[in-house]
Amino acid sequence: MRDDEDRPRRAVTHEIGQGLDTLSVEDLAERIALLHREIERLEAARRAKVAALGAADAFFKR
């Protein structure tokens, strides 16, 4: 077993616009996965807000 396998993994974070030159292929793949999950979370929040606005609009137009 290698020493780096024993170390706890650091949390994957990404800052929009940060340099990518020093990242490994694995690091880039982790960040892409992280950003895909964040996009899914944002889209779900947007859908929930649109639904809530639609329900409120329907309620107050009666």
Image (cartoon, rainbow, N blue to C red):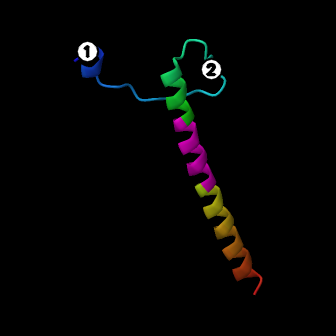
Q: Residue furthest front?
A: 1
Residue assigned mark 1: 2
Which of the image's four quarters has the C terminus? Answer: bottom right
Please state the horizontal and vertical placement of residue 39, each as a whole percent of the image.
61, 45
Which of the image's four quarters has the N terminus? Answer: top left
Residue at the image point whose x is 53% and y is 21% from the top: 25
Please state the horizontal and vertical placement of residue 55, each as a whole percent of the image.
67, 75
Q: Main secondary structure of the magenta part?
A: helix
Q: Is residue 6 left or right of residue 47?
A: left
Q: Which mark is residue 37?
A: none
Amino acid at pointer 2: Gln
Residue 20: quadrant of the picture: top right
Q: Is residue 18 above or below residue 13?
A: above
Mark nearer the N terminus (1 vs 2): 1
Residue at the image point whose x is 64% and y is 61% from the top: 47
The stretch drawn in magenta includes residue 13: no
Residue 32: quadrant of the picture: top right
Q: Residue furthest right?
A: 61
Q: Callout 1: 10 Å neighbours few (<14), some, many (20+)?
A: few
Q: CA distance from mark 1 to mark 2?
A: 30 Å
Please state the horizontal and vertical placement of residue 12, each as a whole percent of the image.
46, 29
Residue at the image point whose x is 69% and y is 81% from the top: 59
Read off the magenta span: 33-43
Residue at the image point whose x is 63% and y is 16% from the top: 19
Residue assigned mark 2: 18
Element class at badge 1: loop
Q: Nearer the viewer, residue 3 or 54?
A: 3
